[in-house]
Image: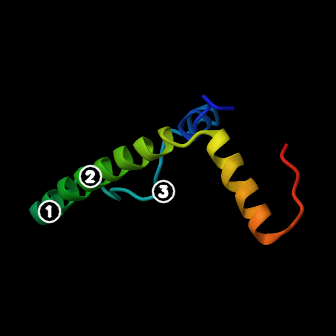
Amino acid sequence: MRTTTLLDIHRAVGGNRVFAIGIGNPTPSCAVEQVVNRTVKFALQEAERALLDSLERVSLADLASDFDAICRGENWGCERI
């Protein structure tokens, strides 16, 4: 649990895409759309890299610890699994 990260889980469930958005027409004939597509593609690649880096820094143990802290703070009487 300490070494399994959210990125590991994302990959294990077949996560090919991080975002469900993207370029609608990858080969437009319009020059404006071509320029916009390049800019959007670059922005999405940067965002995807940032999200994957973030997922790699969070382990299941981190989530369990946060869960336990919330349960204790809310006085829900949750027992540690």
Secondary structure found at label 2: helix
Real-space CA distance between mark 3 and mark 2, rounded to the nearest whole angstrom: 13 Å
For the C terminus, the quadrant is top right
Q: Residue at x 87, y 57 (%)?
A: 78
Q: Earlier in the sequence, mark 1 or mark 3?
A: 3
Closer to the camera, 17 or 37? 17
Q: Which residue is mark 3?
A: 20
Real-space CA distance between mark 1 and mark 3, rounded to the nearest whole angstrom: 24 Å
| Left or right, 52 with reference to 7 | left
For label 1, the crowd category at 10 Å Cα-Cα, with few meaning under 14, some 14 to 19 and many 20 or more, is few
For label 2, the crowd category at 10 Å Cα-Cα, with few meaning under 14, some 14 to 19 and many 20 or more, is some
- Rendered position, 57 above or below 29: above
| Left or right, 20 with reference to 47 | right
Q: Which residue is mark 2?
A: 41
Q: Which residue is mark 1?
A: 30
Closer to the camera, 73 or 17? 73
Q: Amino acid at mark 3?
A: Ala
- Determine the image quadrant of residue 11: top right
Q: Amino acid at mark 1?
A: Cys
Q: Amino acid at mark 2?
A: Lys
